[in-house]
Image: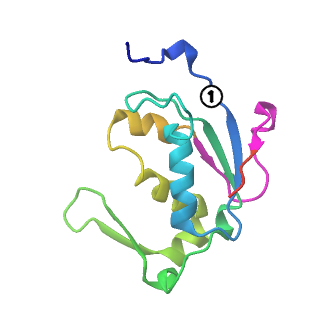
Amino acid sequence: MKTYSIKEADINKEWYVADAANQTLGRFASKIAQILKGKHKPEYTPHMDMGDFVVVVNAEKIRVSGNKEMKKIYFSHSGYPGGTKFLKLHTVRERQPEKIINLAVKGMLPKNRLGRAMLRHLKVYKGSDHPHVAQKPKELEF
């Protein structure tokens, strides 16, 4: 018996729209990461980009549990001495709410070129409007 391996031409990518309003950040991001990886499909293959496109709307209305709003810190470094930057979650929510979901999902994807390709299929928007209406995305229920 031979093991079936899907070909690039046989992969069918769908579009989904997910509403982040009143969703918990970690649980929401893990569901999105599974769809981006393609783990919800029966023909899932770990070494191929099989996932679907996901459009996330209402990114500014995502919830976090506990005291994370004031205590969660996003760290970045410019590469120069003293080039560290520490931003709290509430500051990031005011400036770039899309970044919160983007970073949470990025941490759940593979850390290689395949993971970067999967992350390109994630589109996050601040309000309830998005420019991907022409792709006819299906509503994603949680």
Going by the numbered disc 1, the residue's amino acid type is Lys
Q: Is residue 44 left or right of residue 56?
A: left
Q: Which residue reaches farthest left? A: 81
Q: Which residue is label 1 attached to? A: 13
Residue 61: where, in percent of width, then height?
68, 69
Q: Where are the magenta residues, as a range?
A: 122-138
Colour approach in the figure: rainbow
Residue 34: where, in percent of width, then height?
51, 46
Q: Is residue 126 magenta?
A: yes
Name which residue lies at 58% across and 67% down.
Answer: 95
Quarter holding residue 94: bottom right
Q: Quadrant of the N terminus?
A: top left
Q: Quadrant of the C terminus?
A: bottom right
Structural crowding at the residue carrying mark 1, measured as other residues with C-alpha within 10 Å and reported as few (<14), some (14–19) or many (≥20):
few
Quarter holding residue 133: top right
Name which residue lies at 49% across and 39% down.
Answer: 37
Up the image or down, 113 lies above or below 2; here it is below
Residue 120: where, in percent of width, then height?
52, 38
User: Which residue is at the front of the view, 129 or 5?
Assistant: 5
Residue 104: where, in percent of width, then height?
47, 59
